[in-house]
């Protein structure tokens, strides 16, 4: 039986560790590394969200950073002599992860224990905790 494992990727060491664990735990599975560009958890520079130029610049920068992050994920997969699928989506972190799970026949989710710090973590909550509570499939939270 072919398995599909989703690894939620952010810029934390924990998400890289989660990817490594998924690659180790499921050597024959299809693995997708997903990054969500979530404007709520980012500071769009001094222009603010109402400034179209600042928004466009921020969004382009976010896409470039996502490409770099997922390139790093592909490099980690190379360490295991594996290929992975990478995807970027735009939306709210938790909702986007859970929608991906529901729409793409995912069997298991790996997520880092935390990627946000400070005020963003308090205001937005823990993505890992919410995904674990609401996911219809097993979730492994990696520290």
Image (cartoon, helix red, strand yellow):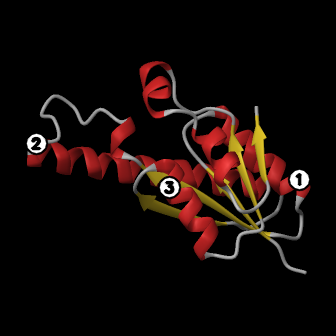
128 versus 78 height, above or below? above
**For the view shown, which residue lies furthest in the top direction?**
118
Q: Residue at x 63, y 66 (%)?
A: 101
From the viewer's perspective, is the residue at label 2 or at label 1 nearer?
Answer: 2
From the viewer's perspective, is the residue at label 2 or at label 3 nearer?
Answer: 3
From the viewer's perspective, is the residue at label 3 or at label 1 nearer?
Answer: 3
Q: What element carries label 1?
A: helix
Question: Residue 55: percent from the left, percent from the top?
Answer: 18, 46
Question: Which numbered disc, 2 or 3, marks the residue that appears first in the sequence?
Answer: 2
Q: Distance between the residues labelled 2 and 1?
A: 45 Å
**Dot label at residue 50:** 2
Q: Quadrant of residue 120?
A: top left
Report the residue marked by disc 1.
Answer: 24
Question: Which numbered disc, 2 or 1, marks the residue that appears first in the sequence?
Answer: 1
Asked if the residue under mark 1 is in contact with the one under mark 3, i.e. CB atoms within 8 Å, the reply is no
Question: Residue 89: percent from the left, percent from the top?
Answer: 44, 61
135 versus 61 height, above or below? below
Report the side of 95 relative to 109 (left or right). Answer: left
Report the residue marked by disc 3.
Answer: 95
Q: Residue at x 63, y 75 (%)?
A: 104
> 10 Å neighbourhood of mark 3: few (<14), some, or many (≥20)?
some
Q: How far apart are marks 2 and 3 (CA)?
A: 24 Å
Q: In which quarter of the image is the N terminus?
A: bottom right
Q: Is mark 3 on a helix, strand or loop?
A: helix
Report the side of 43 relative to 77 (left or right). Answer: left
């Amino acid at each position: 039986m072919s398995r599909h494992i989703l690894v939620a990727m952010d810029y934390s060491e924990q998400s890289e560790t989660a990817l490594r664990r998924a690659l180790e735990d499921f050597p024959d599975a299809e693995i997708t590394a997903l990054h969500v560009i979530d404007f709520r958890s980012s500071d769009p520079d001094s222009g603010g969200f109402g400034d179209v130029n600042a928004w466009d610049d921020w969004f382009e920068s976010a896409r470039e950073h996502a490409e770099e992050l997922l390139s790093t994920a592909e490099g980690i997969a190379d360490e295991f002599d594996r290929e992975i699928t990478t995807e970027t989506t735009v939306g709210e972190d938790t909702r986007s992860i859970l929608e991906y799970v529901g729409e793409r026949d995912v069997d298991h989710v790996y997520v880092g224990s935390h990627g946000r710090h400070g005020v963003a973590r308090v205001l937005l909550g823990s993505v890992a905790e919410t995904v674990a509570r609401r996911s219809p499939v097993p979730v492994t939270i990696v520290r």
